[in-house]
Image: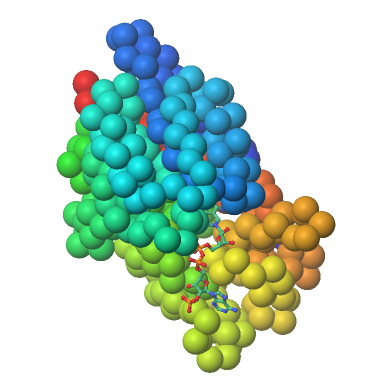
Amino acid sequence: MSKIIEGKKLAEKIKENVREKVISLNNKGIDVGLALILAGENLSSKQYLSATLKACKKTGIKPYEFRFPENVTMNELLNSVRDINNDERIHGALIFFPLPKRIDSRKIVNSILPEKDVDGLGSIPIGKFAAEESTLQLYSKQYDPSITHHLGFLPCTPFGVIRLLEYYNVDIKGKHAVVIGKSLAVGKPLSLMLLTKEATVTICHRETRNLAEMTRQADILCVAAGKPNLINADMVKEGVVVVDIGINVLPNGCVVGDIDFESVSTKASLITPVPGGVGPVTIAMLLENTVKSAKARI
Ligand SMILES: NC(=O)c1ccc[n+]([C@@H]2O[C@H](COP(=O)([O-])OP(=O)(O)OC[C@H]3O[C@@H](n4cnc5c(N)ncnc54)[C@H](OP(=O)(O)O)[C@@H]3O)[C@@H](O)[C@H]2O)c1
């Protein structure tokens, strides 16, 4: 039976640290502000928003909500990001995806100033990371928060996965990491981060032939496909470390990941649950990036 990776526990630790930094900034007369931009009525986005608001309250970060209807225009969103960029009370901005279909999401994300792009999904932070100009942030002991401002923030979900693996003393160097999913928000940056940590990385997607053949080779298996039960026990080897990033809301309202948890946990040495695994760490990383942004501007 595998050991459960308790994301909630690490998230609480990160948030305590954020709380201390927020108090220290408050004592210098600085409130830390985070803009939350939600357009439309997507259920998962609304759940993510309410969890983020709860975490803001816990850490003392001031949320600024920007809510728009499904029929919001590009101009309305761009104008609101411009206001956020110019607002000195706001140190970071998070856009909830998916945005309504007509909206050019990349254009909106890229309109956030890189120093306020605490979700790290703009072309500048992603490009800097790919060019190995911001990889130092993955090595927290050597990392000086005051330089983040010039480097761009690392995307919260993959950064959170690396933190989780480190928290559980998983040695990444030299391991075969298999990542399922190649999105810009999760799979692609996570693959780059694992590569930076010197894993041998295989990236799988919808066109991958014989997925099971790939996943059975994994020492570390990270799944971000958004498909319940994509991975079962036959598709993994004994002792694998499994990180389930997927969040799927079933018709009955239950939230599950991409892994058949019950069967895979009989073979894995470590495994993340859904909920309570990667999700809470993602939010904690977002708040950590926000407080770094505020500190970098002192
Ligand atoms: N825990 C968290 O904090 C967190 C944060 C963000 C996202 N998520 C969750 O993570 C999941 C992925 O999110 P995302 O934004 O990366 O989604 P996405 O943009 O839809 O990307 C999904 C990726 O999975 C691949 N894929 C889909 N079905 C597959 C299959 N049957 N076999 C192999 N690959 C398959 C897709 O391949 P193609 O590229 O070939 O289409 C794509 O690269 C979702 O469930 C999302 O809710 C969780």
Height in image: 185 above or below 156?
below
Kindly identify the residue that appears in the image at 46 percent across and 27 percent down.
63
Q: Position of residue 182 (x, y in %)?
A: 44, 71
Q: Which quadrant, please, contains the N terminus?
A: bottom right
Kindly identify the residue that appears in the image at 35 percent across and 59 percent down.
104
Height in image: 146 above or below 94?
above
- Give the quarter of the image for residue 32: top left
- Give the quarter of the image for residue 172: bottom left
Q: Position of residue 116 (x, y in %)?
A: 29, 38
Q: Position of residue 49 (x, y in %)?
A: 56, 39
Q: Is residue 10 left or right of residue 72?
A: right
Q: Is residue 224 left or right of residue 118?
A: right
- Looking at the picture, tell me which residue is in the foreground, 16 or 284: 284
Height in image: 257 above or below 207?
above
Q: Is residue 151 left or right of residue 180?
A: left
Height in image: 173 above or below 163?
below
Kindly identify the residue that appears in the image at 55 percent across and 31 percent down.
53
State whether residue 154 appears in this view.
no
